[in-house]
Image (spheres, rainbow, N blue to C red):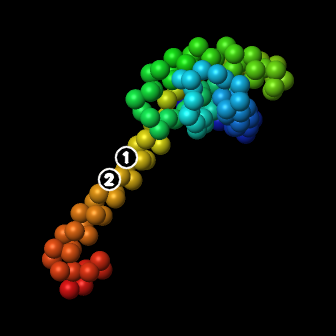
Amino acid sequence: MPTVTRRTRRVGALIRLELSQLLLRRVKDPRLKEVTITEVRVSPDLRQAKVFYSLLDTTRVDETQRGFEKASPFLRRELAARLQMKVTPRLVPVYDDSLARGADLEALIRRVRAADRAAAAARGEDEEGAA
C-alpha cells in the first residue's frame, strides 16, 4: 500500500475541492452531472491522482466513467492553472460504490425493522417486546 503522508492528503483534499468546483461550474458534459467526488488519493510522487466519485443513479456508471475519461485533459489543465504545482497529477477516475451500498444497507435495515414490528404486532406485543 502506498505511503500516505500529510502532504499527499493535503494535495488530495485540494484537488477534490477544485474538481468539485470545476464539475459544478465549468464542465458542460451532461454525463458528469450529479457526480459527487468522494475522495482523491494522490500517489507519493504526486504524479497520479485516483479520483473516487459516486452517483445516486448506478445505471449511469459506465457513461459517467467515459465522460470523466474524456474530460480528464480539460480538468488537468484547469487544475494546473489553479494549483500552481510543479507537476499536475494524471487523473484516474474510479467509481466509489460506498454510497450506493450504504443506501442499500439502510433500506434493508428499514425492511427488517418493519418486519419485526409487524411480527411483534401479530403476537400482540408492543415495540419493547412486552405483552
Q: Which residue is mark 2?
A: 108
Say whether marks 1 and 2 touch (CB < 8 Å).
yes
Disc 2 is placed on an element classified as: helix
Residue 20 occupies quadrant: top right
Quadrant where the image shows the C terminus = bottom left
What type is the residue that disc 2 sits on?
A: Leu
Residue furthest to the left: 123
Residue furthest to the bottom: 131
Residue 18 position within the rendered picture, expressed as x and y whole percent measured from the top left: 73, 32
Q: Residue at x 29, y 57 (%)?
A: 111
Q: Which residue is mark 1?
A: 104
How would you rate the neighbour count of disc 1 (Cα within 10 Å): few for under 14, some for 14-19, many for 20 or more?
A: few
Q: Is residue 13 above or below residue 106?
A: above
Q: Is 44 in front, or is 88? A: 88
Compute the Cα span from label 1 to label 2.
Answer: 6 Å
Residue furthest to the right: 84
Q: Is 58 in front, or is 5? A: 58
Labelled disc at residue 86: none
Does the image show residue 2? no
Residue 127 as seen in the image, left or right of residue 21:
left
Disc 1 is placed on an element classified as: helix
Residue 122 position within the rendered picture, expressed as x and y whole percent measured from the top left: 16, 74
What type is the residue that disc 1 sits on?
A: Asp
Quadrant where the image shows the N terminus = top right
Residue 75 position within the rendered picture, expressed as x and y whole percent measured from the top left: 69, 20
How would you rate the neighbour count of disc 2 (Cα within 10 Å): few for under 14, some for 14-19, many for 20 or more?
A: few
